[in-house]
Image (cartoon, grey):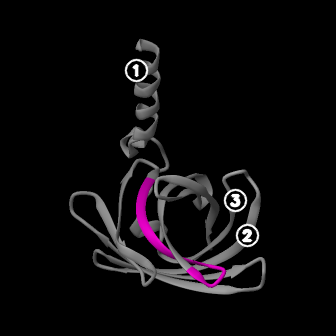
Amino acid sequence: MKKWLCMLTLGLAGCAGVDVDTYRNEAPPLRLEQYFTGTIDGWGQFQKRDGTVVKRFKVVIDASWQGNTGTLDEHFRYSDGSTGRRVWTITAHPDGRYTGTASDVVGEAEGRVAGNALHWRYRLNLPVDGKVYEVEFDDWMWLQEDDVLLNRSVMRKFGFDLGEVFLSFKKRDQ
């Protein structure tokens, strides 16, 4: 019984995840309003949970801010030749939170920045083979030197991992 209880406790603790404040002393500091201004190029891929890469893509983001509201206009070109677009409206709140909306986001995305990291969560209507699935994204970004931003997103449905999206972003010289 003790062994089973210990394993259950460890398993549940593993589900809690990392708090973004873990990165509060990491540099360079991520300031969304500064990083997501101008043109940003990104390269990424989606991997199924077994590690198989099923789709690669390039994204170009045209980003701007007016006051505490940012617009990220994302243009995707996928390895199969298809294209896509998502326009985010991001709001910076005085308490350090960020919220965001886009036409394919269900409700509102929520996130927080600490140090060099952003933790961002949202639900997305994802079209796959003629059907649309509502999936959860648990999204992490970490700013590196030289204006490189690394991104790892875990995609879930009903609490089960479907796969991961890996991205690297690079700001263009302005």
Query: Are the two marked residues, 1 and 3, in contact with CB atoms closer than 8 angstroms?
Result: no
Q: Earlier in the sequence, mark 2 or mark 1?
A: 1
**Number of numbered markers:** 3
Query: In the image, 91: left or right of 28?
Result: left
Q: Earlier in the sequence, mark 3 or mark 2?
A: 3
Q: Residues within 10 Å of mark 2 (few under 14, many from 20)?
A: some
Which stretch is magenta? 118-131
Of 42 and 5, which appears nearest the observer?
Answer: 5
Of 119 and 63, which appears nearest the observer?
Answer: 119
Residue 25 shows in this picture: no
Query: In the image, 45: left or right of 64?
Result: right
Vertical placement of residue 32 versus 61, above or below: above
Where residue 4 appears, as percent x and y from the top left, is: 45, 20
Q: Find numbered disc 1 in the image and state the secondary structure of the residue it sits on.
A: helix
Q: Quadrant of the C terminus?
A: bottom right
Query: In the image, 118: left or right of 129?
Result: left
Q: Which residue is mark 3?
A: 47
Residue 113 shows in this picture: yes
Q: Which residue is mark 1?
A: 5
Where residue 80 appears, as percent x and y from the top left, is: 78, 80
Q: Residue at x 43, y 42 (%)?
A: 23
State yes or no: residue 99 in magenta. Answer: no
Q: Residue at x 64, y 81 (%)?
A: 76
Q: Amino acid at mark 1?
A: Leu
Q: Which residue is mark 2?
A: 55
- Foreground mark, 1 or 3, reads 1
Where residue 19 appears, as percent x and y from the top left, is: 38, 42
Q: Residue furthest front?
A: 1
Q: Earlier in the sequence, mark 1 or mark 3?
A: 1
State yes or no: residue 125 in magenta. Answer: yes
